[in-house]
Amino acid sequence: MPFEPPCFAPQFFFDPDVLSIVRGLMDDSIVADQWGCDVPLRGSEYQGLHVDYQRPLFPELPDLFLPVYVVVVSFGLVPIAVEHGPIEIAPGTHRMPRADALRAIEVEEVAMQSIPLEIGDVLIRHPWALHRGTPNTTDTLRALVTIRYVRRWYADESRDVQAMSHALWESLTADQQSGLRFPIRR
């Protein structure tokens, strides 16, 4: 996502209520380090079940259950009803070995839950919970913005991240700057 209006607004990243929840899940030393927007169009299809940002800290123990060090915050730029293709999530699957989670969904021990959102609603989830996008059957573009927050010590190269202009960086407060980790374009 570009760091320019109308796509970028600092309040996307610095809502005090959202940050309070995210800090409660992790700690006060968090940064936003990735963001994007999913926009399924009419005719889109079900995505395959997947997780986001699967980079285990210990590759030799990929199913090791650890304290939360990454969360994803999503919100709609338009109301997202079932017909607009909301995200579906399999609750609790972030705490299961992947093969067990997929099997649990297949035999319906775990049900996929559709997450419609109104303007102002926020979805905070663990990125390793199995999820998928669903078909948009309308002519309305379904825009879902997603921001990844991580503990300050965590970094990975899981996605290309667009740079922020130096002028925009300088327009942010010191507190706002300390809460972001994005490349700065000179």
Image (tube, rainbow, N blue to C red):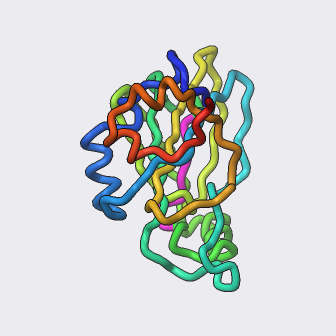
Foreground residue among 132 and 72: 72
Expressed as whole percent of the image width and height from the top left, the position of residue 32 reads 47, 47
Quadrant position of the N terminus in the picture? top right
Expressed as whole percent of the image width and height from the top left, the position of residue 173 reads 33, 34
Residue at horizontal 58%, vertical 16%? 140
Residue at horizontal 31%, vertical 37%? 15
Stretch in magenta:
86-92
- Number of callouts: 0
Residue 147 placement, left or right of 1? left
Residue 16 placement, left or right of 157? left
Would residue 83 be seen by someone viewing this image from the given angle? no
Q: In which quadrant of the rendered view does residue 98 lie? A: bottom right
Foreground residue among 27 and 164: 164
Residue at horizontal 53%, vertical 64%? 154
Residue at horizontal 51%, vertical 73%? 95
Residue 182, placed above or below residue 5 = below
Residue 22, placed above or below residue 76 = below
Expressed as whole percent of the image width and height from the top left, the position of residue 115 reads 47, 42
Farthest front residue?
186
Residue 61 part of the magenta segment = no
Residue 59, placed above or below residue 15 = below
